[in-house]
Image (spheres, grey):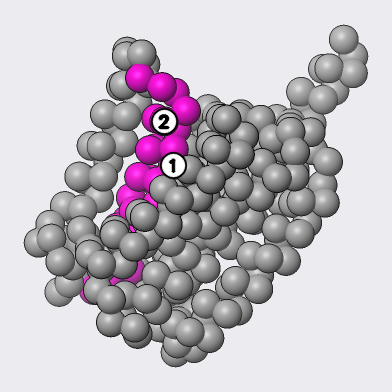
Amino acid sequence: MNKLPQITLAFWVMKICATTLGETAGDLLSMTLNVGYALSSLILIGLFFASLVGQLRSERYHPALYWTVILTTSTAGTTMSDFMDRSLGLGYASGSALLVSLLLLVLAAWRMSEKSLAADHINSRRVELFYWGAILVSNTLGTALGDYLADDSGLGFAGGALLIGGLIAAVALAYRFTRVSHVALFWLAFVLTRPFGATVGDLLTKSHAQGGLELGTIGASAVLGALLIVLVAQAARNQRRELLVGEAG
C-alpha cells in the first residue's frame, strides 16, 4: 500500500515548485480575481477534499494524483493563512505561532497513535490521514511564516528566500553528514520548503517597488504550472519504466 514517491532530489524540486505555485495561484484567486480570502478558502478546501478522496481511494502511487493533493493543500493553505492573518487580524507572527502549535499537535497525535512519524511508507488509512493532515497544516504555516519573513522581519522577499534556502541547505547537510534523525529532518525540510515557496512566489509576483520581479500572479502561475506539469509527466514516465523493468524481471 505504498502510495508515496521516493524521497529524492526530484521530490524536493517538485515540492518547492508545487508550493510556490500554491502561493501564486492562491493569491490569483483571492486577490487578483478579487474573490476574497474567505470564499477562496472555501473553494480551495473543497478542491483539497475532492483530490484527497481520490488519493485515499487509490491503491498505489499515482504521480499526477499525489502532486494534485500537494498543490491543493498549498493553495488552500495560502488563502486560509491570509484569512487568519489579515481578515481576522491575527498578524503573521501570531498566526505562525498558532499554526506551529497545531502542527506539533498533529505530529504528536500521529506519534502517539503509530509510534512513528516515518513518511516513506503508507500502510494504513489512519496513517495516511495523519500524513495529509500534517501536510495541510505545514503548508498553511509556510504561508504565514513566509509572509512574516518577507513583510514583518525586514528581510524582504529575496532576503526571506535566502534565509529559508540557507536553512534548507543546512538540513540537507545534516541529513548527509550527521546522525540526526532522518524522520525529524524530513519534516523540518518539508515545513521549510513551504515558506521558501511562499517567499519565492511573492518575489515573482510583487512589483519592483515592493522588491519583486513583477511577473504578476497570472504570469508566475502559468510558468510554475507548466514546469510542474513537465516534472509530473517525467515522474510518471519513470514510474512506468520501473514497473516494466519489474515485470520483465
Q: Nearer the viewer, residue 35 or 232?
A: 35
The reply to whether residue 175 is in sight is yes
Q: Label 1 neighbourhood size at 10 Å, few (<14), some (14-19), many (20+)?
A: some
Instruction: Please tell me the numbered disc located at residue 184.
Output: 2
Callout 2–callout 1 Cβ contact below 8 Å: no
Q: Quadrant of residue 87?
A: bottom left
Pinpoint residue 168: horizontal percent, then vertical percent: 31, 36
Q: Amino acid at mark 2?
A: Ala
Whether the magenta-drawn stretch holds residue 205 is answered as yes
Residue 95 image position (x, y, % from top left): 31, 67
Q: Which residue is mark 1?
A: 190
Q: Is residue 64 visible to us here? A: no
Residue at (76% x, 59% y) in the render: 53
Crowdedness of circle 2 by 10 Å Cα count: few (<14), some, many (20+)? some
Residue located 13% across and 60% down the image: 153
The residue stretch that appears in magenta: 180-207
